[in-house]
Amino acid sequence: MNIVVLGPGAIGSLWAHSLHCAGHSVSLWSRSDGHTHTIQVDDGRAIVLANHDTPALEQADLLLVTVKAPQVTQAIQPLLKHLHSECIVLLMHNGMGTAEPTSKILTGNPLVLATTTHGVYRQSDSLILHTGLGTTQLGGYNAKGKQCQFLEDVLHHALPNVSWNPNIQEALWHKLAINCAINPMTAIHQITNGELNSNNYSKELDRVINEVSQVMNAEGITTSLATLKETVYKVINATAKNHSSMQQDIFYHRTSEIDFITGYLLERAKAHNIAAPSNAALYEQIKRIEQSWKSS
Ligand SMILES: NC(=O)c1ccc[n+]([C@@H]2O[C@H](COP(=O)([O-])OP(=O)(O)OC[C@H]3O[C@@H](n4cnc5c(N)ncnc54)[C@H](OP(=O)(O)O)[C@@H]3O)[C@@H](O)[C@H]2O)c1
């Protein structure tokens, strides 16, 4: 396939590298406008891919969007005039709430959503470390996107395991629940995921998960408080030494994905008239921290 990866950071570089090695014609669209970009994964062979190659964009069968949630629509916007209407647009990021605005700016393109649990650390512009093998789920957002199940094989061949989920919203909600529980608290307290196991945080964590499970049920996602708690603590233990992406964003004074994680949850809670004070408090705290950089 002709593939353009928009936003070759940690996750985008991993996919660009894997898809290139699987034999696809891959080019990049990064924020900087250099004509080429080098990617090395761990101590493997470095590859050089074209960057900002407009003819490649015009011929793209797949636009893989791996910018963070707050950048999705603004990153896609300038590319629209070059995309043909059958080019599949695949959004792969944490958080929810970007699919609807993206579908509005596209001109009938198939839209597919994905969530991945791979762990990738960007050591430098060209070197990424694949720190955790994960799995990826994808599924269609609009009618044309729902016909793109063949992507499962394409992506699985490049970077297994990949599965097609006809109910991708459910998978995204489960990832959102984990992110709502782990990300804001680790960011506010600047702690590792594993430190959430301390008694100091257990009551707050329980309240957060309880609110998330109520909203999920109202959204028609089948889950129970007990199942959700078990999943969250499993992730906390499996990633005990890791720093969450929001912890890193706050540490480095980068705008976090809070609006698309807890912010999205609060939006849906409001729509269902569900009180979510614990999540609201975490949201406000992250916003206050981000605001403090602007005023200092
Ligand atoms: N890393 C992981 O292990 C991991 C795992 C699962 C899910 N995720 C999720 O995957 C998403 C991407 O994360 P990441 O870790 O790969 O972040 P990242 O390393 O910051 O990558 C994002 C990339 O998008 C680029 N970008 C931003 N705006 C752009 C624009 N307008 N045009 C072109 N490129 C643009 C950034 O460029 P600059 O460098 O110039 O800002 C950066 O290279 C996030 O939602 C994250 O939560 C990450």
Image (cartoon, rainbow, N blue to C red):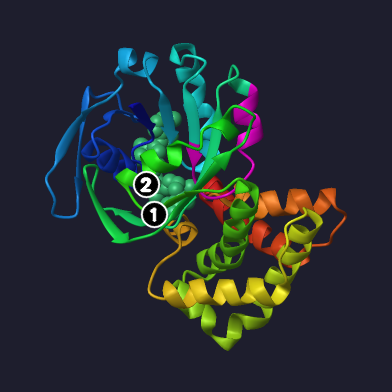
Residue drawn at (33%, 42%) of the image: 15
Query: Which residue is labeled 1 in the image?
Result: 161
Q: Which residues are magenta?
A: 91-104
Q: Which residue is mark 2?
A: 156
* Badge 2: residue crowd in 10 Å (few <14, some 14–19, many ≥20): some
- Is any part of residue 53 visible from this angle? yes
Is residue 19 magenta-colored? no
Q: Quadrant of residue 199?
A: bottom right
On screen, residue 4 above or below 236 = above
Please tell me which residue lies in front, 202 or 226.
226
Identify the amino acid type marked 1.
Asn
Disc number placed over residue 114 in the picture, else none: none
Vertical placement of residue 146 versus 286, above or below = above
Residue at left offset 61%, top offset 61%: 180
Residue farthest along the bottom direction in this orientation: 199
| CB atoms of marks 1 and 2 within 8 Å | yes
Q: Secondary structure at mark 1?
A: loop
